[in-house]
Amino acid sequence: MSPPAPLLSLTGVRKVFPGVTALDNVDFEVASGEIHALLGENGAGKSTLIKVLTGVYKSDGGEMRLAGEVVSPKSVVDAQSAGISTVYQEVNLLPNLSVAQNLTLGREPRRFGLTDWARMNEAARNILQRFGLDIDVTKPLGHFSIAVQQLVAIARGVAQSAKILVLDEPTASLDKTEVEVLFNILRSLRGEGVGIVFVTHFLDQVYALSDRITVLRNGRKIGTFETAKLPWPKLIEHMLGYELQGTLTGNPARRAPADSEDAELSVDAACVDASVQDISLIARSGEAIGLAGLLGSGRTEVCRGLFGLDRLSSGQIRRNGRPVRFTSPQNAIAEGIALCPEDRKANGIIGELSVRENIVLALQARQGWWRPISAREQRALADQAIADFKIATPDAEKPVGLLSGGNQQKVILARWLAIKPDILLLDEPTRGIDIGAHAEILRLIRELCDSGMALIVTSSELEELVAFSHRIIVLRDFRQIAELEGDAITEDALLQAIAS
Amino acid sequence: MTYLRAIFSSLQRHRMLWPLLALAMIWAVIVVLNPAFFCFTVKDGRVLGGLVDILNRGAPIALIAIGMSLVIATGGIDLSVGAVMAIAGAVAANIISGGALPVWMIIAAGLGTGLFAGLVNGTLVAGLGVQPIVATLILLVAGRGVAQLINDGQIITFQNESFAFLGVGNILGLPTPVWLVAFLLAGLLTLTRKTALGLFIESVGANASASHYVGIPVKSVKLAVYAISGLCAALAGLVATADIQGADANNVGLWIELDAILAVVIGGASLMGGRYSLALAVISALIIQSLNTAIVLSGIPPKFNLVIKAVVIIAVLLLQSSIAQAQLASLRARLTA
């Protein structure tokens, strides 16, 4: 079959943010009547590309053509009237308006200049019929479940008779049958000649639905492939940027597996409602456990459960063999557990406060507000940390929000090491930091292990996990699907486990 | 000359500069209008003078602004302070007119009422997750009704010299309200800065989620600031009630929440939460009171009061804004170049 003329084509698109090139000369094509999956790990540039496509961002270079015509949408409305409509991951409709109003917003049927309610509701019912959705369209949207709201959002996008329909993680809140309904509709839209761009991290859905796949990594296009000709492991290689070559990376410090007797922390079949299921692991002193898996596989959720941010619905956590229950981070901290969170800006640093204050905060919180750490001790702690971790700051009084990502990460590490934890959870400790700080943090992980701490580290970078982990737990769809130990830990084996 | 410049630049980096400068300028205008304003005289063991008057009259705003500072530092707001003043005053007047209880019990009852009101606000915000502006709006609306119910809708007046001392008494020549502001400021400075409470408050205001991750009891911190604000409001209510020796549920502390919020903002605090300064809140309360006094002294018809107040306040806020600061700096660079 000869390649159909592209309905939408982007050539050489660039988007630069201060300090980072989010899109670097990306070409992207969508044909009429195709479902095109856009894939990549966090930070690969998927959302930026979509935002350029839909007029949220203005590109810094390159050209975009829709049906042969050069277009450069300046706003979402602009893009919509050109025929590109988008359904976002989070529902962005108006929960206080009725379903029918949401579906017809901006183009309500009118009579004598007033809204024709009867026709509006009729039109809405017709639209939803396609989705097999039999609900009262006069009720406010907020009245229905998130899944229904998501379907309504999709129905609205479809109803705008778009040429290009962009779906950003549309299935995140849908159950299996709802996903099936959505897929059937997308297939029939494809039959009508609509070009569909589909972003997801559920790879099985990609294989079930898409015709072609484009993979992005670090703002660059890795390639466009026909889905039928791209085996699953190959896709994962492209996404993660590794090749199966049988490389062995030895870790000298690996020990023989031991029983759970000497476990600092053991987790037995832990489940969190609507999150991770059946997680079991044993963390021992002097060992680093790697948590591997693709984006959305449940790595962060495991950390949340272990740190008391989410409550376990079943299962058991034991600390030195003693059962413990965490209802808040305070409980976990009292048991000597610390967490460097994945989203540094939202959950880690307190940007307005100084480096010194950020470093003493965890220790101070554990001591309680009525037992202040003296100004002199605070300065000593901060100066020590700045020297030990080579934190690049003119002095300890600089607001931490003004430091670079790597230095912020070091401040958070220093904060937790000040309470001398026995178990340290590091969720993506090297994401978004420069090479130099990266190496230092990896060195630190080894040092902490050697000093007898138990570490649990998540990372998207296989090389990194292989380099420092004594054991690796592989997650997919919120469940643990494999565990690698000792000499079995190689990038190859890990990749295969993730891709299996 | 370079020495002066060094002082100026270090002051400028300090957040005290603009509020202090604004206060000094308003006082300068007052001196021009009435050269004798800042003269002190001592009569019957009381120090009299314009400055004492400003301090005394500014006391209720200052008391409330101190509590409000802490609430705003957590990213919240307390609209109910005026209503809490009314309730505390009504409770005190009710007890006084009901019989001869010792004055400390009257005060304790008034403060206890304020504490309770603050805990209700705090529970709504921290426990139930109601938005602060909505949670405290409830008491803003309902509070004066409660105050009216306490005294059957009547304005209660009373004669109780020991209670009236709170409003019109003198200690070492200075009015009691001035001392109360000083004690409250010193007390809360000690409570928040000699412990880690102040750090926790700023941390919660600057990033509540990260504070939770770090193990700070975010909900308790929020509950505490609303409780403190309720106490401060009750104290202001007792002072105002003692001052006029009567409880007027409809008018005591009317709109004072807005003056108090204004004082905190003039003090350079962000309504989004984060850094706060109790001393600056008090200085800013004095700015507002001095402005009121200056407008009265100037002989401008009272109908211009609110407009002039608004203009001056906008000017003070503009001077502090980072954009205006940057423009000032570039202007200075151009002039010195």
Image: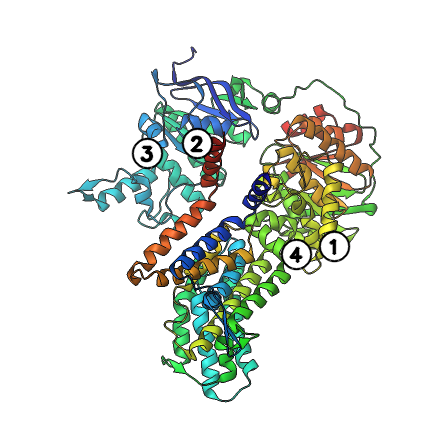
Badge 3 element: helix
Q: Do labels 2 and 4 share a chain?
A: no
Q: Which amino acid does label 2 sit on?
A: Leu
Q: What is the distance, in whole Å, between disc 4 and disc 3 at their CAs? A: 57 Å
B299 up-or-down from A58: above or below: below
Q: First in sequence: mark 3 or mark 2?
A: 3
Q: Are marks 2 and 1 on the same chain?
A: yes
What count of labels does the image hold?
A: 4
Identity of the residue drawn at 46% across and 23% down? A36
Q: Name the residue under label 2.
A: A167
Q: In which quarter of the image is residue A229?
A: top right
* Residue B137 position in % (x across, y down): 42, 62
Q: What residue type is labelled 4?
A: Ala
Q: What is the distance, in whole Å, between disc 1 and disc 3 at their CAs? A: 54 Å
Q: Are marks 1 and 4 on the same chain?
A: no
Q: Which colour scheme is used?
A: rainbow
Q: Which of A312 and A226 is in front in this view?
A: A312
* Left or right side of A67 for B271: right
Q: Name the residue under label 3.
A: A159
* Residue A488 position in % (x across, y down): 77, 28
Farthest-out residue, bottom: B99
Q: Are marks 3 and 2 on the same chain?
A: yes
Q: Mark 4 points at which residue?
A: B196
Q: Mark 1 points at which residue?
A: A323
Q: What residue type is labelled 3?
A: Ala
